[in-house]
Amino acid sequence: MVDRAGDFGCIAEVWIVSAGYGLVPISANLESYSATFSPGSADSVAQSKSGQRDNQAWWGLLASWRNRDLQGPRNLTELALQDTSSPMIVALSKTYLQAVLHDLADAAEAMGKKADLLLVSTGTPPDGLEEVQLPCDARFLTSLGGSRTSLNARVADRIIATSDRHEFDSAKVRNLLQKDLDRSKDILRYDRRKQTDFEIQHWIRTRLNVGAFSRSSLLRELRDTGFACEQRRFAGLYDEVIAGNCR
């Protein structure tokens, strides 16, 4: 997600970093698509070990694609050059940040002031963007709520909601977020035990035999009993059990 701020801290435009269409305004009418920069999916743009390079190459191709239904800037650099005096808030996951990394670095250089680019993304900042990345880590979940997957968007929303207090000045925004973090509680760490795929599937079958349960409720129950399982892995195991029961 990308926000361009107009005068007096008002949000003028919202843009989406899309793996299917490139940079698009939030108001764009798009056909459905399944492309993603995130790894581990059948719809992942990168299907090789050189995933980051594949994603960056794909983003470059999307930027060069001129579509009559998509007018205006086609990448972040072109968006920055539209008005180099307007701040830009960029909220991206680590994978999507790596995909647009070179484009974003060029956009930062194109800005009238590099500090007008406000990057919201968890993890270690990429080379060249250290000074524009804002404080953002899991501790924000205790004050902003939501899940880790939506954390970047929630932090960006926090910045926008308080825009009248800082007018998107990067130093003031950084100070605001750091104060929020200092007041946030530490994230609880769960010491859950791991299980094999066979053990988890056996547990799923046992629970399904005594009642109808949704996938999400079963995962929550499994974790509450002290066992660990990543959400995507559990979804795959659950689907295999359901498919087996339907035969």
Image (spheres, rainbow, N blue to C red):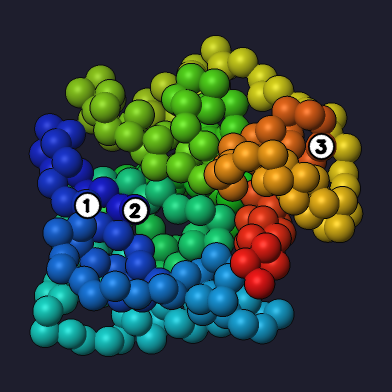
The mark that comes first in sequence, 1 or 3, is 1
Q: Residues within 10 Å of mark 1 (few under 14, many from 20)?
A: some
- The answer to whether residue 153 is left or right of residue 169 is right
At a point 25% along the width and 57% down the height, the residue shown is 15
Q: Position of residue 176 (x, y in %)?
A: 42, 22
Asked whether disc 1 touches disc 2, contact meaning CB atoms under 8 Å apart, the reply is yes
- The answer to whether residue 200 is left or right of residue 145 is right
The secondary structure type at the circle numbered 3 is strand
- Give the camera-side residue of 227 and 73: 227
At a point 56% along the width and 17% down the height, the residue shown is 184
Q: Position of residue 170 (x, y in %)?
A: 37, 35
User: Hey, which residue is sitting farthest top in the picture?
Assistant: 183
Quarter where residue 155 is shown: top left
Q: Residues within 10 Å of mark 3 (few under 14, many from 20)?
A: some
At a point 35% along the width and 67% down the height, the residue shown is 18
Q: Amino acid at mark 2?
A: Met
Q: Amino acid at mark 3?
A: Phe
Q: Position of residue 142 (x, y in %)?
A: 54, 21
The image shows residue 14, relative to residue 143, as above or below, that is below
The image shows residue 219, relative to residue 39, as above or below, that is above
Tell me the tag on residue 14.
1
Q: Position of residue 90 (x, y in %)?
A: 37, 50
